[in-house]
Image: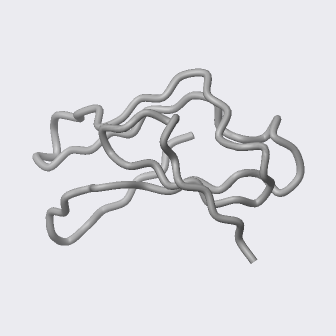
Amino acid sequence: IIILFKLKDAVTLGSYQLITSDEDKRYDLKSWKLYARNDNTDWVCLDKQTDVELTEERNAVVTIKMGETLNSVSVTTTE
């Protein structure tokens, strides 16, 4: 899956969020890479996670701070 955002101005990314499946943890992301570029040419890997379990909670928002491992994620349940 590739999701591309095009921003008008440069930003500093401090964290990002993922939402777990509302059905079954089999549908949650297990591994991913987060890339960015600011020169329209070279992509830089900002974060890489491999073979992780986000949380047992369903429909939960998982906040991942840049530079931290998933042992320290913040989880909140969506309404």
Extreme residue in the top direction: 51
The image shows residue 78, relative to residue 48, as above or below, that is: below
Q: Is residue 77 left or right of residue 63?
A: right
What is the total number of numbered labels drawn onto the structure image? 0
Quadrant containing the N terminus in the rendered view: top right
Tell me which residue sits at (75%, 77%) in the image: 79
Colour scheme used in the picture?
one colour
Tell me which residue sits at (58%, 54%) in the image: 62
The image shows residue 79, relative to residue 49, as above or below, that is: below
Please name whichever residue, 29 or 67, is drawn nearer the observer in this view of the structure.
67
Residue 57 on image: x %, y %: 78, 52
The image shows residue 48, relative to residue 57, as above or below, that is: above
Extreme residue in the bottom direction: 79
Residue 76 on image: x %, y %: 64, 64
Residue 5 on image: x %, y %: 37, 59
Tell me which residue sits at (14%, 49%) in the image: 38
Q: Is residue 64 left or right of residue 56?
A: left
